[in-house]
Image (spheres, rainbow, N blue to C red):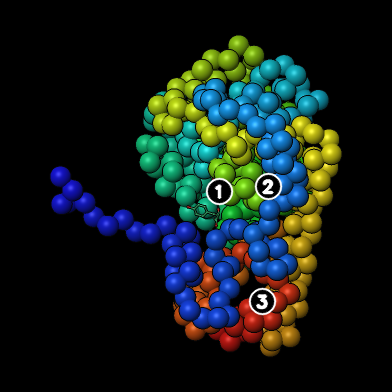
Amino acid sequence: LFSAVEMAPRDPILGLNEQFAADTNPNKVNLGVGVYFDENGKLPLLQCVQAAEKALMDSPKPRGYLPIDGIAAYDNAVKKLVFGAESDVYKAGRIATVQGLGGTGGLKIGADFLRHLNPNAKVLISDPSWENHRALFTQAGFKVETYRYYNAGTRSLDFDGMLADLKAAAPGTVVVLHACCHNPTGYDITPAQWDQVIEVVKAGQLTPFLDMAYQGFANGIAEDGAVVGKFVATGMDFLVSTSFSKSFSLYGERVGALSVVCASKEEAAKVLSQLKIMIRTNYSNPPTHGGAVVALVLEDDKLRAQWEQELGAMRTRIKAMRQKLVEGLKAAGVKQDMGFITTQIGMFSYSGLSKDQMVRLRNEFGVYGTDSGRMCVAALNDKNIDYVCASIAKVM
Ligand code: PLP
Ligand code: TYF
């Protein structure tokens, strides 16, 4: 039965983790996977999460099945976070939200739902995009193509190309857009450019699917969420996937969501019923712990304030490391102006280094980034930055 099964390639990013773990270089630094490490190089366990877990432990609850769409208080908290408690869409009950297994789960439920709705639609993702976007939408049965986004030659956004490609897309095309902190480039479009994108998406009757995996990592929770409000303001139907993996440092708990903005409350109820079929036939219902923690933090004023403070600290530290990286590279003898690193935002920097240089960084120095030149600046700290800068300087 399985004799013809071929070995699949490793996930280009998660595969690096395995290679990193096996590396015996004592100076090794993992800038491969998009994970935030604190100033001591440790994966943080947020204080707000610990406090919520303690509160949950203090009044332990039995673990029955959750509803198919997850914890109601969680879904409601996600709606308020993403769309605003005062927004008309929220108040009118026009959003269908389901708890998902991380942001990936939210994307996949959305992809499966859209595919049932419109099997012939194409999906457009940015060039480049998070590696899993293409794979996920392809597995869901879509033909996946790209819209221009980044010009490696000029090391900047190709916004005209992006607009032209979106303009050329057929009505019904699903457009996957990174809401903030573009993965892998670290370049986001400006609010004014978002307005232009939204105009084209609306005029072309495209289906926007916002991937919000880093809310709070660019400029703040509300600031990063503003793009969602722009889409709401157009009256379009659209989808938003949410991930709390990074913003709560809850990677392994798999907490995320999918929200679908509909034309009416009645439509949202029907959409929700269909999303539940997608969930039921895949994994029946989500796990309890992560959702319970996030719901508690989002809904409790004190824990919520603590979360915002801790998320703000992660954001600020990443920005400081970007600055130190630019200065450190200069001090290490890099002649080229690396100032673009501080223009980029979120967890990643597209360094512009070639595949050969990235392979050398890995093999000779134990500094791991992806072949595309992407480095996770959220894994830099005062202890490893000089070594990283010296290593990059050597391969440049
Ligand atoms: N979308 C983007 C752009 C990401 O970078 C990630 C990374 O983790 C995800 C989705 C998936 O998030 P999760 O790990 O919560 O599934
Ligand atoms: O891009 C990243 O590094 C993160 C983590 O299949 C990730 O988004 C990478 C690959 C993958 C799942 C998550």
The label shown at residue 384 is: 3
Q: Please give the name of the residue rendered at 74% of the width and 57% of the height, measured from the top-left corner.
A: 314
The label shown at residue 299 is: none
What secondary structure is marked by label 2?
loop
Residue 285 percent across, percent down from the top left: 49, 28
Q: Quadrant of residue 342?
A: bottom right
Residue 64 percent across, percent down from the top left: 53, 25
The residue tagged 2 is 248
Mark toward the start of the polypeptide (3 vs 2): 2
Q: Please give the name of the residue rendered at 49% of the width and 84% of the height, measured from the top-left corner.
A: 364
What secondary structure is marked by label 3?
loop
Residue 362 percent across, percent down from the top left: 50, 77
Residue 63 lies left or right of residue 264; in this view the side is left
Mark 3 or 1: in front is 1
Q: Quadrant of residue 383?
A: bottom right
Separation of marks 1 and 2 at Cα, in angstroms: 11 Å
Q: Residues within 10 Å of mark 2 (few under 14, many from 20)?
A: many
Of the 4 image quadrants, the one containing the C terminus is bottom right
Q: What is the three-letter code of the residue carrying label 3?
A: Asn
Q: What is the three-letter code of the residue carrying label 2?
A: Phe
Separation of marks 3 and 1 at Cα, in angstroms: 25 Å
In contact (CB < 8 Å): disc 3 and disc 2: no
Whether ligand 2 has any atom under 8 Å from the Cβ at mark 3 is answered as no
Q: Quadrant of residue 150?
A: bottom right
Q: Please give the name of the residue rendered at 44% of the width and 65% of the height, measured from the top-left corner.
A: 18
Asked whether the viewer can see residue 283, the reply is yes
Q: What is the three-letter code of the residue carrying label 1?
A: Gly
Mark toward the start of the polypeptide (3 vs 1): 1
The label shown at residue 252 is: 1
Q: Residues within 10 Å of mark 1 (few under 14, many from 20)?
A: few
